[in-house]
Amino acid sequence: MSEENSSTIINDSSGETKRRTNPRKRSVRKRRSLYIEPKPVCFIGQGNNAELIEEILKSIGYENRPDKVDEYKFKWVQCSYEVNWNLFKDGEQIVNHIQGEDYFTNKLQLYQSLQTYENTSQTIIKRPPTYLSLNEYLPQTFKLDEKHDRDILFNLHKPGDVWICKPSCLNQGKGIYIVRDISSLKDKYDQLEANPRSRSSTFRQQNKTIVQRYIMNPLLIHGKKFDIRCYMLISSVQPLLVHYHSGYIRLSMLLSVEGILSLKVRLFPLKYMQKKDPKYYEMKEDTAWTMEQFNDYMNKYILPKKKLPPNWVLEVLPKQIERIMLNVIESIRMRLKRRIGCFGLYGYDFMIDDDLKVLLIEINVNPALSTNTNTLVQAIPPVVKESILISIECFEKIHHAEKIFPLKSLQTFQCIYNELERKSSLPLIRQKRQLSPSKATITNTDDKALREKTNFFYSVDRTQLNQQENELLSTLHRSLTHSQLMRTSKSVNDIHQVQIQRRPLTRPKSIRSRSKSSNRIKPNEPAQSS
């Protein structure tokens, strides 16, 4: 029934026209549900300002349920091992950790990832424009659990050199110690080598340590040492989306005077270490600066002396930090497990030397979120809230197959890596002319092995092809020799060709049926006598 015929016009005694509705017509207004739609459930782990996370999630409609350890829509915890990855539901749940993040948040694995990326990139002529060699952004580093690295360190050491030893799995400056006398370090590891217990894998895993050259000429703020805490947000791993935030400045309470024995106190301006000082609560407001304050200081005291234009902090420094972050991402992007719903907020620590060289110190998987100074109140809560909103928006758009960009939640973060638009900076090697003539070429034995491997790939189904491709891409980043790199890249190309050319195959006739048809006597054809 049309809307015009659904009512009747009548005139009452007063001459006014009234409309009488048809009682058979259904009401247009929808009836409300008898039950209130439940709020999405979140689980928030304790510690590291969990109240801030709960406040943010409640403001966007989530309900915190401490009993829902695995039955949640959103989960925020401090460590990755607090997530039951076997029960995690891809595309249905959101969690603030990524499987494989240890490859860049663990100090030793970060160095190994960057070292492998550099070795692999050196075999490629056309390197990405963001590529940096290790000595451009990382202090000289050695692995103390490897004898080869220790021997290089002991031979390289000169009187007056200072080294910093860092346990690979600790943060907040825990376990760090200074080495001035290299002979004491050598004696320590000689004794460990002689101890049979030190040969066990468990002991080696617990005692993995890196040693870095101490930065002797750091840039100072009013005579105090400082570092930069900025943030990297991976809002999605499938596709891989990475964002950068400039963060804030952390200052030391003590003057950096040469010859002070308490070097550990002024090693890093960390709140964890400075809180032990009795004067901390009197001076805590001076231990954190905004980037605008740092920019004003540089414009007034540092840049004129170096004859550099103003606003170096706002214009040049972010580009250098972003470039370092991109090198980190390129070194580990193949090792991240691609699961929809995983994101991560990571704290990057940088230092600047007197020549304005930006150096990466470490990357934290669980950056401190406490807000005990006015600067931190201004800096940290907006960063955390925006990172959560961006990650949820990316998740919802991916879940509903919508276009991800533009992101409405993107305010102060800047997207520096978009896998949807970016080509790999480690291109697959298809032709020998892409390689340096001085490098080795593939041998006949390698070709034979490659053909056998390719024939095997043709015989497996599509799922197995994808698994083999992931393994080969992981091998690509671990390849240290040129021939290995060539074989791995060529094999990945062959897999791509298989996936492109693969078509549904019709069932072939059996040999027996073909033999019968071939022996069948055609009409008007005499039979052959035996």
Image: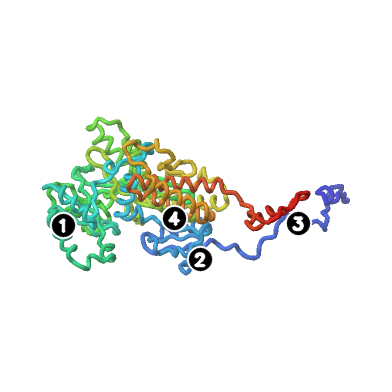
Please tell me whether mark 3 or mark 4 is closer to you in this view.
Answer: 4
Instruction: Identify the residue at the far front of this view.
Output: 530
Residue that badge 3 annotates: 27
Comes first in the chain, label 2 or label 4: 2
Q: Are there few (<14), some (14-19), or many (20+) residues within 10 Å of tag 4?
A: some
Comes first in the chain, label 1 or label 2: 2
Please tell me whether mark 3 or mark 2 is closer to you in this view.
Answer: 2
Comes first in the chain, label 3 or label 4: 3
Rounded to the nearest whole Å, what is the CA distance between mark 3 and mark 4? 52 Å
Q: Amino acid at mark 4?
A: Lys
Q: Are there few (<14), some (14-19), or many (20+) residues within 10 Å of tag 2?
A: some
Rounded to the nearest whole Å, what is the CA distance between mark 4 and mark 1? 38 Å
Residue that badge 2 annotates: 71
Q: Amino acid at mark 2?
A: Glu
Residue 337 is marked as 4
Mark 2 element type:
loop
Rounded to the nearest whole Å, what is the CA distance between mark 1 and mark 2? 49 Å
Q: Nearer the viewer, residue 314 or 501?
A: 501
Residue at x-position 19% and y-position 42%: 217
Comes first in the chain, label 4 or label 1: 1
Please tell me whether mark 1 or mark 2 is closer to you in this view.
Answer: 1
Rounded to the nearest whole Å, what is the CA distance between mark 2 and mark 4? 21 Å
Residue 185 is marked as 1
Q: Quadrant of residue 296?
A: top left
Q: Quadrant of residue 425?
A: top left
Residue 450, x across and y down, in percent: 43, 49
Q: Amino acid at mark 1?
A: Leu
Comes first in the chain, label 3 or label 2: 3
Mark 3 element type:
loop
Please tell me whether mark 2 or mark 4 is closer to you in this view.
Answer: 4
Mark 4 element type:
loop
Mark 1 element type:
helix
